[in-house]
Amino acid sequence: MTDLKKYQMYIDGQWVNSESEKTFESFNPATEEPWAIIPEAGANDVDRAVKAAHRAFTEGPWANMTATERGKLLRRLAEVLAEHSEMLGRAETTDTGKLLKETQWQARYIADYFQYYAGLADKVHGDTLPIDKPNMWTMTVREPLGVVAAIVPWNSQLFLVAVKIGPALAAGNTVVLKASEHASAPMLEFAKIFEEAGFPAGVMNIVTGYGDPCAKALTSHPLVARVSFTGGPETARDVVRNSAENLAQVSLELGGKSPMIVFEDADLESATNGVLLSIFSASGQSCVAGSRLLLHESIHDKILSQIAKRAQEIRIGDPLEETSQMGPLATLAQLNNIKSTVVDATANGATLIYGGGQPAHLAKGWYCEPTIVDCPNQNLGIVQREMFGPVVSVLRFRDEAEAIKLANDTRYGLASGVFTTNIGRALRVTNSLRAGIVWVNTYRMVSPMAPFGGYKDSGYGRESGLEAIYDYTRSKTVWLNTSPDPIADPFVMQ
């Protein structure tokens, strides 16, 4: 126990234990061993963090800072992030099993998000209105909301924190971030970056703990003005119910069951690489994972054979090693769920093409083979449920209309991929897909400038892009009477 790394929460500019002094262990998925000790926050710890954020919002240096000054701080944050990307990436890899080369790249790239929102900080403005009343000068102003509660899962935490707190801070809000109990260390390491960048106390606060009571207390707190949540639909419903206590605004990003549609006229080499990218990178632990592969019947066997061959060649191993191409899953529960779901699928008519278990050459770690399951229909659980692992279910279609029908036949609607060389078809299909993001002849492209979010059970609200920053503001309308005459008697008809 003495060699485990001990973390503290970051509240009001100070490093603190939980009030109860309770802690929990964080496990390294590659070794199945505990490696860090994390504070277990209770309702009182959350209350302290929210009140600190509220004070910072209403008084002190942050409350009196100009938008340009906020932008300078965000630029400084981006610079410090880039300087410490190796450390941040290593913490995330150790805590989640994601490949080190991916986490360190992501840590460097999210600096661009903070640079982008630094540039937008002094670009948020209202309007003057050509009003239909004489002698009235009318305008709108944009103001920050107040305290923002940000809740992130364990996967791609650095990216998710950037798309949430970047626009929130640029707009002038303060933040309480609740890290995932499965992987809190990267967020606590991020707090050190925030501190080094020089933000005033209370602007950013990070609490760690379980959904109940930590997230429950945060999302229902009377001083929280907005909740930005990334996670699953079931937990999201609890978040929405909790927000009824404070009538906070809510945005939700809830994952997906994204279709990859490959038409018969597609560049097959490009499509194969796109499929591999969509489902096996990050071990499939991505909200936009292309976990439903829809193949035109004329190319079904050929593409399936190519993907199976490439899947067998993927090097699974220690995520800290440069040569590894897939690391472990983040939790044992995920691994067990995948194995049982694959067994259920094959018992109900599906064909296991490859994978479905743990790689034999790795004695320890929550590793999962890349898994390909050819499915007879859409009704199987493996097709309908988000697996959050390297598992792709394959279906075939006859024509464009059937492809669209199959793609939309899901409760989710976050992302989708289309592979075709026919531009007319690409536009028709894109227009018909019920998804917030459509990638054509590519996949998993993101940018600070491009909105990110879904339809249906994949949530509502958008992250990234210009519209995200407006989600963290409210509009105020100002009327100014310019007439030199006094206001007329209200009880005399004019």
Image: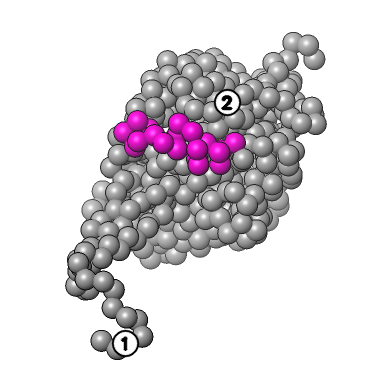
| Vertical order, 414 against 204 (above or below) | below
Q: Badge 2: how crowded within 10 Å, few (<14), some, or many (20+)?
A: some
Q: Is residue 204 left or right of residue 124?
A: right
Q: Which span is picked out in magenta?
A: 52-70
At mark 1, the secondary structure is loop
Q: Nearer the viewer, residue 47 or 436?
A: 47
- Mark 2 near mark 1, Cβ–Cβ under 8 Å? no
Residue 408 is a magenta residue:
no
Residue 168: x %, y % from top left: 44, 41
Type of amino acid under label 1 = Val
Question: Going from the N terminus, do you reach mark 2 or mark 1 first?
Answer: 2
Q: Which residue is mark 2?
A: 13
In front: mark 2 or mark 1? 1
Q: Badge 1: how crowded within 10 Å, few (<14), some, or many (20+)?
A: few
Residue furthest to the top in view is: 3
Q: Residue at x 55, y 32 (%)?
A: 202
Which disc number belongs to residue 492? 1
Quarter of the C terminus within the rendering = bottom left
Residue 341: x %, y % from top left: 68, 47
Type of amino acid under label 2 = Gly
Residue 63 is a magenta residue:
yes
Q: Residue at x 29, y 73 (%)?
A: 487
Question: Can residue 466 be seen by looking at this rendering?
Answer: yes
Q: Is residue 479 left or right of residue 33?
A: left
Quarter of the N terminus within the rendering = top right
